[in-house]
Image: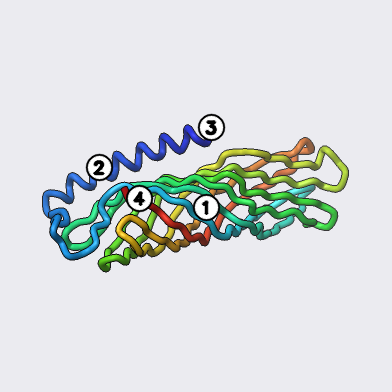
């Protein structure tokens, strides 16, 4: 519920920013004419996506004046929903706002630092993003930037000593997200998409019961395909 509320706040901020940008641009740019021979990308849309997820989990562990560093990959699948609004100008530039909400199966569980075990999981995720693109008739090339959030788990267990355990489970962390992609309208109301999206969820510093410190950093790479319906 906390994650859904955070997405709603982010969505409102992006939509307000898009409305202000649209008002400023309308003073010098005209909308696409109704009788234009080119495909018009303006309007609302909603769709589904699926693809691959690659999480990068980096940790620095400081114990008894010793420093251990590890960078582990967490691979899996990703799937979910997306939707938003586009506005196309007469010069074929397109701006828009988009929300997505999905689930990743990306997970990593292995041994690091000799006898230590680690666990990293990237679960439910979502973002609120602005989009900027250029339309070549039915082909739209775009970039996107915004704020993303995800449900993350980072654990380290030092042998069997509970005092050495570092546990950070089911936590929501936000960060900056950006990506690029292409869409193609293969029917009047149906659009296919391929895109790459990267999100950096930033640093988290934790201390275990023995006073040792662990610094976690989580990054998520998504390569996904989607199909949407334009209303």
CA separation in Å, label 4 and label 3: 22 Å
Q: Quadrant of residue 137?
A: bottom left
Q: Secondary structure at mark 3?
A: helix
Q: Secondary structure at mark 4?
A: strand
Side (left or right) of 201 relative to 230: right
CA separation in Å, label 1 and label 4: 17 Å
Q: Are marks 2 and 1 in contact (CB under 8 Å)?
A: no
Q: Which mark is residue 19?
A: 2
Neighbours of disc 1 within 10 Å: few (<14), some (14-19), many (20+)? many
Find disc 1 in the rendering and name its residue: 200
Side (left or right) of 218 relative to 212: left
Neighbours of disc 3 within 10 Å: few (<14), some (14-19), many (20+)? few
Give residue 114's position: percent from left, percent from top. Answer: 83, 57
Q: Which mark is residue 2?
A: 3
Q: Earlier in the sequence, mark 1 or mark 4?
A: 4
Q: Which residue ends up furthest to the right in the rendered image? A: 160
Q: Earlier in the sequence, mark 2 or mark 4?
A: 2
């Amino acid at each position: 519920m906390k994650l859904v509320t955070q997405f709603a706040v982010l969505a409102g901020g992006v939509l307000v920013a898009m409305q202000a940008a649209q008002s400023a641009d309308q003073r010098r740019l005209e909308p696409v004419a109704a009788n234009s021979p080119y495909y018009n990308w303006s309007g609302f849309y909603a769709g589904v996506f699926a693809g691959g997820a690659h999480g990068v989990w980096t940790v620095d562990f400081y114990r008894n004046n010793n420093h251990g560093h590890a960078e582990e990959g967490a691979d899996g699948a990703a799937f979910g929903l997306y939707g938003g609004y586009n506005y196309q100008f007469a010069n074929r530039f397109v701006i828009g706002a988009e929300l997505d909400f999905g689930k990743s199966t990306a997970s990593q569980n292995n041994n690091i630092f000799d006898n230590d075990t680690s666990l990293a999981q990237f679960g439910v995720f979502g973002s609120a993003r602005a989009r900027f693109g250029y339309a070549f008739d039915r082909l739209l090339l775009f970039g996107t930037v915004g704020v993303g959030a995800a449900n993350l788990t980072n654990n380290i267990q030092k042998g069997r000593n509970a005092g050495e355990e570092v546990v950070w489970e089911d936590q929501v962390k936000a960060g900056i997200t950006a990506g690029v992609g292409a869409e193609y309208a293969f029917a009047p109301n149906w659009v296919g998409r391929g895109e790459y999206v990267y999100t950096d969820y930033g640093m988290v510093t934790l201390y275990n019961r023995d006073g040792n410190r662990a610094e976690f950093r989580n990054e998520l790479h998504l390569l996904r395909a989607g199909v949407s319906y334009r209303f």
